[in-house]
Image (cartoon, helix red, strand yellow):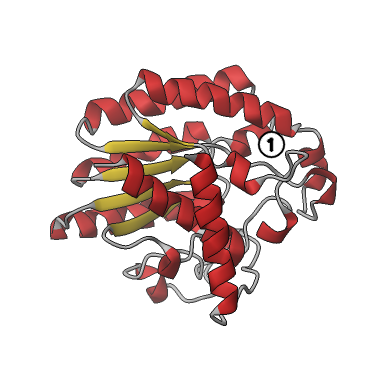
Amino acid sequence: MMNGVLFIALLVVWQEKSDGGDPTVLPQANAAHSTSTLVEHSSPLSTLGTKQRLNYEQWVTLLGDEISTMAAKNPDHLTILLGDSLSLWFPTELLPGRRVWMNQGISGEKTYSLLDRLHLLDVADVDTIFLMIGINDLIWGQSDQQVLANYRDIMDYLATRHPNTQIVVQSILPHGAETATWESRSLLLELPNERIREMNRSLEDIAQDYGAYYLELYPIFSTGEGKLRPDLTTDGLHLNREGYLVWRAAISLYSQLELP
């Protein structure tokens, strides 16, 4: 399946270029400090002004308000992007069709803080959750054991409170290692990509244990050396538009092949 995902993802990127699409690099994600980054069309962020700085608690409150508003509409096929800045910066116009998408990502999010805000989803009838979380834990010093324990707690909560929701566990993406220009590049150099691959193998096992789906993205984002492909990133950690096109194609194909 992954060979098919890779082929279609690359085809989509090629088509975007040939059609005159703009592969402009997106700004580096630092969304916890910018009100212009939440990609949900109905976001109340516009009322705060583009220069307003939000702390983490304000972001959580804002996302809680958004999910409550959406829950009142009770749309069919409500689908949540759940995670950190990689999910947060997913361009709205690139999200696959036939679903009502809500972006519930927060920049800098870690497994333990995500766990603390999962209750916000309880007001809604969620069809599918695409979950990607863990890279910030690894970058900032959490042990593999603690990350996996937190991940199991996340899955426990979702399985208990949202038993009819399809959970898609997405693998953690590689980073650019020595080619990265991210401001905390030194921390990336202390995190071997092999450790991320090992973590992904454990996440696949966790998904299987909970009867969830697993979407392996690592191969289509990595070079032959296992690093994040330089043509898909802004800084060796975050994605540019072409990176999101590849991700969009993978989600779209996976949804068609795997999700009912």
- Where on the picture, by quarter, is residue 258? top left
Q: Residue at x 64, y 54 (%)?
A: 238
Front position in the image: 101 or 18: 18
Horizontal and vertical percent for residue 139?
A: 69, 36
Q: State the residue at coordinates (54%, 62%).
A: 11
Q: Which amino acid type is marked by label 1? A: Ile
Q: Residues within 10 Å of mark 1 (few under 14, many from 20)?
A: some
Please give left or right for residue 130 compared with residue 193 in the image.
left
Can I make out residue 226 in this image?
yes
Closer-to-camera residue (107/80): 80
- Pointer 1: what residue? 139
Say if 218 sits above or below 54 in the image.
above
Secondary element at tag 1: helix
Q: How many marks?
A: 1
Name the one closer to the observer, 108 or 172.
172
What residue is rendered at 50% in x and 33% in y?
Answer: 111
Q: Left or right of 224: which side holds 9?
A: left
User: Where is residue 126 shown, x and y percent of the image?
Assistant: 23, 45
User: Residue 53, percent across and down?
Assistant: 54, 64
Q: Is residue 110 left or right of residue 96?
A: right
* Residue ID at (83%, 51%): 179
Seen as rendered, the residue at the extreme bottom is 20
